[in-house]
Amino acid sequence: MLTIKQITENTEAVLRGLEKKHFKNAKETIDEVIALNDKRRTTQNLLDKNLAEVNSLSRTIGQLMKEGKKEEAEAARARVAELKESNKALDATMTQAATDMQNVLYTIPNIPYDSVPEGVGAEDNVVEKMGGMETELPKDALPHWELAKKYDLIDFDLGVKITGAGFPVYKGKGAQLQRALINFFLDEARKSGYTEIMPPTVVNAASGYGTGQLPDKEGQMYHCEVDDLYLIPTAEVPVTNIYRDVILEEKQLPIMNCAYTQCFRREAGSYGKDVRGLNRLHEFSKVELVRIDKPEHSKESHQQMLDHVEGLLQKLELPYRILRLCGGDMSFTAALCFDFEVYSEAQKRWLEVSSVSNFDTYQANRLKCRYRSAEKKTELCHTLNGSALALPRIVAALLENNQTPEGIRIPKALVPYCDFDMID
């Protein structure tokens, strides 16, 4: 979340950033935060003043009794009692103001960087780069859901029977391809210096608040109400929360972690062609990259993550493009975000497969994730993450773009992981 220092010292800049993110009622919300902070500080000052008076009077009572000034000592005791009673009310007021302020801060999105373009939605995103191999398909090319049925790779109907729509069952070479991609992505991350983590796939509410999924995405997360736990929408949540309430040493940074997990998203409100086949699922596999870094190095870290994801798509021989997201299309928590999309020749559309984001200090402030500099000064870290990669749409693009009259060709980089070079 935004820091009070950001809001009080750079109010106009914060409001401009919130306007770029199209955050409604920005001025009223920021004014409310400032008013609650003023109330908290004023109450704190009065409480401190009263506590100082209590301490001073308490020290003099014994001396007054020794000097035989019983009446003055009793008056001092009465004043102490009065102050203590007043302090209870002041403490309650200060605590409530701090709680209310925190709750309002949780509802305010991150401020986008100046390099984030203006815009309302996906149509305003900027194409930064295009790459990969052009694809020529047979005239009778099929979309991936038909290919999955033809070659018995994925059974969508069986998933509906077992669980419901959006929970496919991978079979035979379809399951092998899925596992091959997971291992390929993890191996590539390890080669790039990432340490693999195997985290839980359920988290508590504190973890959801720490990375910003709560309260913003509460309705999109599966909630286990009896235990008050949430199924993770991405490995970002448990992996980043490893560093909640932690003070790191500067020499430990940057921290580079990767994790493969299943991910769960309700995708409430999704319908139509965008949800066909693997295009949008409730459960899917993903390899995530997470970095914790110093502020002055986070830009370089972000670029390294972008280069890593681009390298994966190049090795998979897929046509891709990189988008710089506009303010209105960015996530609640991101300060800067680039999306990677692969082109589905059979569907004639672009499919998002990765978002690589820099959150600046926004998540770190929620997490209380800090580092101690060489000068022994404690500062907030920067956090970054990115998908490397999400599997469903990668599988869809691989099946569709590599179909031939003889079968579906496997990219060379994946063959050692699949142990086959053709699905036929």
Image (cartoon, grey):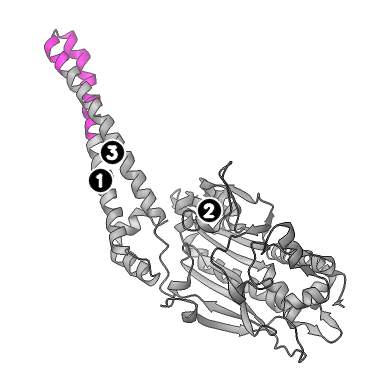
What numbered label is drawn on residue 250? 2
Main SS category, magenta section: helix
Q: Position of residue 177 (x, y in %)?
A: 79, 69
Q: Tag 2: residue type?
A: Glu
Q: Position of residue 114 (x, y in %)?
A: 40, 73
Residue 411 vs residue 71, the one in the foreground: 411
Residue 58: which quarter of the image? top left
Q: What is the secondary structure assignment of the residue under circle 2?
A: helix
Q: Residues within 10 Å of mark 2 (few under 14, many from 20)?
A: some
Q: Tag 3: residue type?
A: Thr
* Residue carrying label 1: 39
**Which residue is at a point 87% across and 73% down the rendered structure image?**
420
Q: Tag 1: residue type?
A: Lys
Q: What is the secondary structure assignment of the residue under circle 1?
A: helix
Residue 305: which quarter of the image? bottom right
Q: Which residues are magenta?
A: 48-75
Q: Residues within 10 Å of mark 1 (few under 14, many from 20)?
A: some
**Which residue is at a point 22% across and 37% down the rendered structure image?**
46
Question: Magenta stretch containing residue 71, yes or no?
Answer: yes
Q: What is the secondary structure assignment of the residue under circle 3?
A: helix
Quarter holding the C terminus? Answer: bottom right
Quarter holding the N terminus? Answer: bottom left
